[in-house]
Image (cartoon, rainbow, N blue to C red):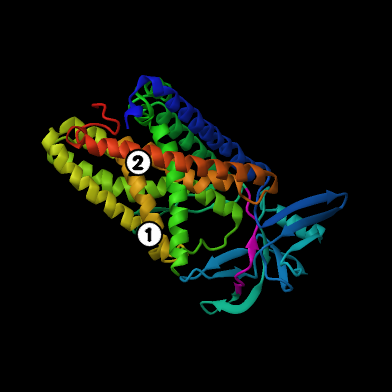
C-alpha cells in the first residue's frame, strides 16, 4: 500500500489517468455515433422512402424482423389503438393500404411499390411531410366488439425515424411508474438528452471536489488515490468494474440454471433512444428518491430545508456540512441501509415491472445498484447518471446494427475488460487503505481529504 503515497511512484497514477481519459474520449465519440443513428442512418426495422420519378411515385421498402414466408400488408398512416393488455389494433377505415407482400425465408421485405396519383393526393392533403409506414399482419380479432379495429400480428413493424412522434415518457418512483403526457419526436428527445448529458459531463469533469486537471496534478504527488477526488475519474474507474462484474455474475448464475433473460425485441431505433433516457429516469427514481430523500428528511429535521433540497443533488456533501462527526457516523448507517434498499428495489423492478428480464437479473441489477448508490452518495447525481449511461448507452452505440463499427466495438470491449481488472485492483487497494484508517476516514472523503 505504501506505493500509493510515495512521490517516486506518481507515474503509475499519471499512466492510469491517461488510460481512463482514453476511455472518456471513446464515450464522447458515442455521442456522434448516436446522432448518426438518429438523424443520418436510422436503424429502424422498417426503412421507407419515396422516389418521385416523373409522374410515378414509388415507395421503397426495406424491412426485417417479420415472420418468414407470410403475407403482410403495407399501410401508410393507419390509426393504431391498444387495449388494456397492450395488444395493437389497426383501424382499417383509416390510412392507405399500398400493397400486399410476402416475406422471404429470413422474414425480410424489400421492394418498390407504386402509389397512385389519387392516393398520393389524399396522403399529402394532411399537410405532413413525414408519414408512418407499417408492414402489418392484419388479423381477425376485433377490438372491444368494433369490427373496424382488427388485430395486428406480433411481428408487425412500423418505421421509426427522428420525426416519429411520441406521446408520453414513463418515469419511476422506485416501483411505481408515472406516465408524463408530453408530445415530442425522437429527434427532439435525443437532442434534449444529448444536451443534458453534456452538462452532466461538464459538471463531473469540474468536480465536485477537484477538476479533472486538478485531480491529475494531485495524483502526481499523492498517488492513485488523488484521481478519486474527481467525479469523472471515479465514474470511469468504477464503470468497467461494474460492467464486467455483472457479466461475470450473470455467467455464474447461468451455470447454475438461473437465467438473466433479455429485453423484448422492439424496433432498434426506439430501443436506442430508450437506452439514452433510461439512466436519467432510473437514477432519479431509484437513487435520488430512496437515498437523497433520506438525507433530505434528516436535514429537514434539523431545520436545514435548503441544504436538504441540495442533498438530493449531492447527499454526502450536505450531510457532512451540517453534522457533527458523531451525527454523521449515525446517519451514515442510515445511508448504507438506503443504498441497500434502493439496490434491491432496482433489481426487483427489472422483473416486476414487466421489462422481460429473467430472475437472474435481480442479482446483477442489485449489484450494479450498490455501485450506483455509493457513487451517488459520495459524488452526487451527475456521476451516478453517467455511470448508468456508460453501462446502458455507451457500448450499445458501437454495437448497434452497423457492421462498420464492429471493429471499434471489439477494441473498446477489450479495452474496458483490461480497465476492469486495473480498476478492481485500484478500488481494492483504496478500500484496504480506507478500512485501515476507518476511525479517521468515517468523516472524510473517499481518499481521506477532509471536505
Note whether residue 306 is visible: no
Q: Give the numbered dot on residue 363.
A: 1
The answer to if 126 sits in the magenta stretch is no
| Pointer 1 or 2: first along the chain | 1
Marks 1 and 2 in Cβ contact (< 8 Å): no
Q: Give the numbered dot on residue 157.
A: none
Residue occupying image coordinates x 34% and y 23%: 6
The quadrant in which the C terminus is found is: top left
* Magenta-colored segment: predominant secondary structure: loop
Q: Which residues are magenta?
A: 151-161
Taking depth in this image into account, of 292 and 448 the one nearest to the observer is 448
Mark 1: few, some, or many residues within 10 Å (few <14, many ≥20)?
many
Residue occupying image coordinates x 34% and y 37%: 429
- Secondary structure of residue under mark 2: helix
Determine whether 183 is above or below 14 in the image: below
Q: Give the numbered dot on residue 428.
A: 2
Picture coordinates of residue 229, whole percent (x, y): 34, 29
Quarter of image, res 123 = bottom right
Mark 2: few, some, or many residues within 10 Å (few <14, many ≥20)?
few
Amino acid at each position: 500500500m505504501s506505493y500509493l503515497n510515495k512521490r517516486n511512484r506518481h507515474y503509475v497514477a499519471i499512466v492510469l489517468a491517461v488510460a481512463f481519459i482514453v476511455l472518456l474520449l471513446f464515450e464522447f465519440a458515442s455521442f456522434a455515433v448516436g446522432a448518426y443513428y438518429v438523424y443520418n442512418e436510422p436503424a429502424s426495422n422498417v426503412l421507407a422512402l419515396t422516389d418521385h420519378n416523373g409522374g410515378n411515385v414509388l415507395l421503397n421498402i426495406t424491412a426485417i424482423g417479420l415472420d418468414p414466408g407470410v403475407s403482410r400488408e403495407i399501410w401508410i398512416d393507419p390509426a393504431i389503438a391498444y387495449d388494456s393488455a397492450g395488444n395493437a389494433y389497426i383501424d382499417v377505415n383509416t390510412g392507405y393500404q399500398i400493397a400486399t407482400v410476402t416475406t422471404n425465408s429470413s422474414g425480410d421485405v424489400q421492394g418498390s411499390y407504386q402509389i397512385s396519383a389519387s392516393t398520393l393526393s389524399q396522403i399529402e392533403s394532411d399537410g405532413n411531410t413525414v408519414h408512418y409506414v407499417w408492414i402489418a399482419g392484419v388479423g381477425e380479432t376485433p377490438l372491444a366488439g368494433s369490427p373496424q379495429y382488427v388485430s395486428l400480428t406480433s411481428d408487425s413493424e412500423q418505421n421509426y425515424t427522428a420525426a416519429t412522434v411520441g406521446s408520453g415518457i414513463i418515469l419511476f418512483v422506485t416501483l411505481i411508474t408515472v406516465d408524463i403526457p408530453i408530445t415530442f419526436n425522437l429527434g427532439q428527445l435525443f437532442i434534449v438528452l444529448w444536451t443534458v448529458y453534456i452538462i452532466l459531463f461538464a459538471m463531473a469533469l469540474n468536480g465536485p471536489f477537484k477538476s479533472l486537471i486538478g485531480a491529475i496534478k494531485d495524483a502526481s504527488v499523492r498517488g492513485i488515490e488523488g484521481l478519486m477526488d474527481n467525479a469523472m475519474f471515479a465514474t470511469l474507474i468504477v464503470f468497467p468494474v461494474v460492467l464486467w462484474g455483472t457479466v461475470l455474475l450473470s455467467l455464474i448464475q447461468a451455470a447454475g440454471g438461473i437465467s438473466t433473460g433479455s429485453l423484448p425485441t422492439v424496433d432498434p431505433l426506439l430501443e436506442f433512444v430508450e437506452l439514452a433516457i433510461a439512466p436519467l429516469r432510473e437514477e432519479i427514481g431509484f437513487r435520488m428518491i430512496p437515498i437523497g430523500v433520506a438525507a433530505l428528511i434528516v436535514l429537514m429535521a434539523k431545520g436545514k430545508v435548503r441544504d436538504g433540497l441540495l442533498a438530493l443533488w449531492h447527499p454526502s456533501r450536505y450531510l457532512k456540512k451540517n453534522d457533527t462527526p458523531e451525527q454523521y457516523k449515525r446517519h451514515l448507517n442510515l445511508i448504507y441501509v438506503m443504498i441497500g434498499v434502493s439496490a434491491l428495489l432496482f433489481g426487483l423492478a427489472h422483473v416486476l415491472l414487466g421489462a422481460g428480464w429473467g430472475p437472474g437479473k435481480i442479482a446483477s441489477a442489485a449489484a450494479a445498484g450498490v455501485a450506483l448508490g455509493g457513487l451517488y452518495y459520495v459524488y452526487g447525481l451527475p456521476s451516478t447518471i453517467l455511470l448508468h449511461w456508460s453501462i446502458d448507452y455507451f457500448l450499445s452505440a458501437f454495437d448497434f446494427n452497423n457492421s462498420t463499427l464492429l471493429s471499434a466495438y471489439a477494441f473498446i470491449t477489450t479495452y474496458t475488460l483490461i480497465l476492469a481488472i486495473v480498476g478492481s485492483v485500484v478500488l481494492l487497494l483504496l478500500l484496504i487503505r480506507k478500512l485501515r484508517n476507518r476511525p479517521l476516514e468515517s468523516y472524510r472523503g473517499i481518499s481521506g481529504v477532509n471536505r
